[in-house]
Image: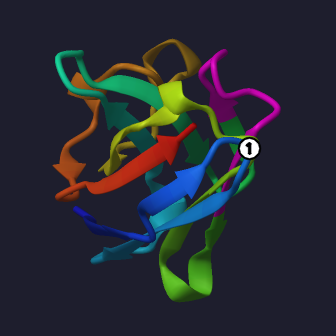
Amino acid sequence: QVQPVESGGGLVRVGGSLRLSCKASGRTIDTYTMGWFRQAPGKEREFVAAIRWSTSTDYADSVKGRFTISTDNAKSTVYLQMNSLKPEDTAVYYCAGGPLLTTPQINRRNKYTSWGQGTQVTVSS
């Protein structure tokens, strides 16, 4: 299994950008599905984005066109570039790793087997 550790969260103004990083120790990440989820106060953890084979990406409708997931396999790191941030993007963001998943499974958090501790993203208006 991979062991994800997130970094890069913080406070940003509406319309700003942040890049989250997820260092995944263990096996090479291109043999895994790597995903980002987020959880706002009082809400369930929700899917944000995922990447498979370093090139196949999937996004939640709420972030399409604004967020980009990518990997640097040499560094075993997954990135989430977040642009045009909105107040509703405020949440704790979690990186997760799992086996190679099918498209219908990609947004299901119970399919991911390893989770990071989370990093806070706060978007102020």
Point out residue 25 in the picture as x, y percentages from the top left corner.
30, 79
Classify residue 85 by image quadrant: top right
- Please state if 120 lies on the left or on the right of 60 as rendered: left
The N terminus lies in quadrant? bottom left
> Is residue 114 part of the magenta span, yes or no?
no
Q: Is residue 77 above or below residue 44?
A: below
Point out residue 47 in the picture as x, y percentages from the top left corner.
43, 26
The residue that appears at 75% across and 41% down in the rendered structure is: 84
Helix, strand or loop for disc 1: loop
**Residue bounds of the magenta highlight:** 58-70
Point out residue 122 in the picture as x, y percentages from the top left corner.
42, 47
Q: Closest to the observer: 113 or 100?
A: 113
Q: Amino acid at mark 1?
A: Gly
The residue that appears at 35% across and 19% down in the rendered structure is: 108
Disc 1: which residue = 15
- Neighbourhood count class around disc 1 (C-alpha, 10 Å): few under 14, some 14–19, many 20 upward: some
Q: Closest to the observer: 16 or 28?
A: 16
Point out residue 103 in the picture as x, y percentages from the top left corner.
57, 20
